Image (cartoon, grey):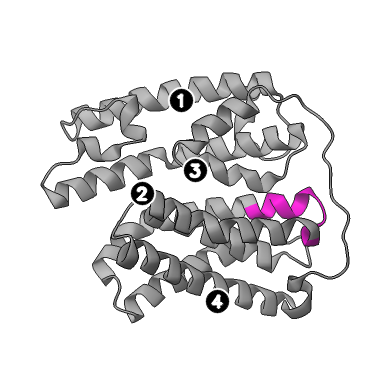
Amino acid sequence: MKKMLQFLRWDGALGRGGYALWGFVLMAIKYNLDRALAAWVFERPWSAVNYFLAGNVLSMDLPQDVKFGVAMVLWGLPFAWIGVALTVRRLRDAGLPLGLAVLFVVPVLNVLFFLLLSVLPGREPQIPARAGRDWLDRWLPHSVWGSAALGVVLTGLAGIGAVALAVKVFRGYGIAVFVMVPFCVGLVAVLLYGYRRRPDWGRCAVVASAAVTLLGLGLIAFMMEGLVCLLMAAPLAYPLAILGGTLGYWIQRAGEPRVRTPPVIQTFALAVPLLAAGE
């Protein structure tokens, strides 16, 4: 039983064979559970195509569509947690940056990414050398509370901007808003918080939760969302933010945070708008 539960770990490495095996087994289990939930509870069809074109199973009944969408995402959160953990271990084995694990939650790309990691051989990690001070070094506070506060405020404001872009410009409420924004807010908040140190996981989870809380309060303050809608989204947003924060925690533990943090932040600054535009 102990060996069967090793896939829940975030530490250590995982070879391509084990990653591929666990991945295909978990995908098969999740697909059949998703199909059962859609058919038995919501009386809707479900196929593998719906992971890429979820609109195929939506109806003209908005309240039921919202309930269906929330239920499917909540149902998938444990699988997302396990999948990101497995991907972190596989990236560690392949010697690749752990920040790439965010691709696991990006539709379409996650399938291609999984197939790639299933064939890449293992190797020693290549950590780039620091070349002078980067832009974070110049303005990020040195104190624990200062870096935590700045991480929460900046990511909360950035999350508000990302939601505004997705909703007001691209006119869409999709994966970019409900999944990627809280995930990335938690991730980047922890990366900023742990830039000069390697904090424990509990504090990282608190920072990630505080950042997504500020995001929600900002959406209410700018009258972009109502309180009821945000309360409905909270069961999705907090676990996703903590999942992103956990990824940030392991990125910091993997090596020199000052080397790994800036490229990850720059990547995610583009990831959410591009996904929103694609949707």
| Identity, as a three-letter code, of the amino acid under mark 2 | Glu
Q: Nearer the viewer, residue 68 or 158?
A: 158
- Which residue was labeled with disc 3? 105
Residue 250 image position (x, y, % from top left): 69, 49
Task: Indicate the amino acid at tag 4.
Answer: Val
Q: Which residue is mark 4?
A: 153
* N-term mark: 1 or 3: 1
- Find the distance from the CA under tag 4 to the CA under tag 1: 36 Å
Which region is colored magenta? 248-258
Q: Earlier in the sequence, mark 4 or mark 1?
A: 1
Q: Determine the residue located farthest toward the left in the rendered image.
A: 60
Q: Are marks 4 and 1 in contact (CB under 8 Å)?
A: no
Left or right relative to 160: residue 130 = right
Element assignment for label 4: helix
Q: Where is residue 104 drawn, in percent x and y?
A: 53, 39
Left or right, 17 with respect to 169, comes to right
Q: Are marks 2 and 1 in contact (CB under 8 Å)?
A: no
Q: Residues within 10 Å of mark 2 (few under 14, many from 20)?
A: some
First in residue order: circle 4 vs circle 2: 4
Determine if residue 200 is in view: no
> Disc 1 and disc 3: Cα gap in Å?
14 Å
Please state which amino acid type lies under the numbered disc 1. Answer: Met
What residue sits right under mark 1 in the picture? 27
The numbered mark at residue 279 is 2
Q: Residues within 10 Å of mark 3 (few under 14, many from 20)?
A: some
Image point (29%, 70%), residue name: 225
Q: Residue at x 78, y 78 (%)?
A: 138
Rendered location of residue 35, percent (x, y): 29, 26
Residue 209 is at least partly visible in this image? yes
| C-alpha distance separating marks 2 and 1 | 23 Å
Q: Residues within 10 Å of mark 1 (few under 14, many from 20)?
A: some
Which quadrant would residue 23 be assigned to in this image?
top right
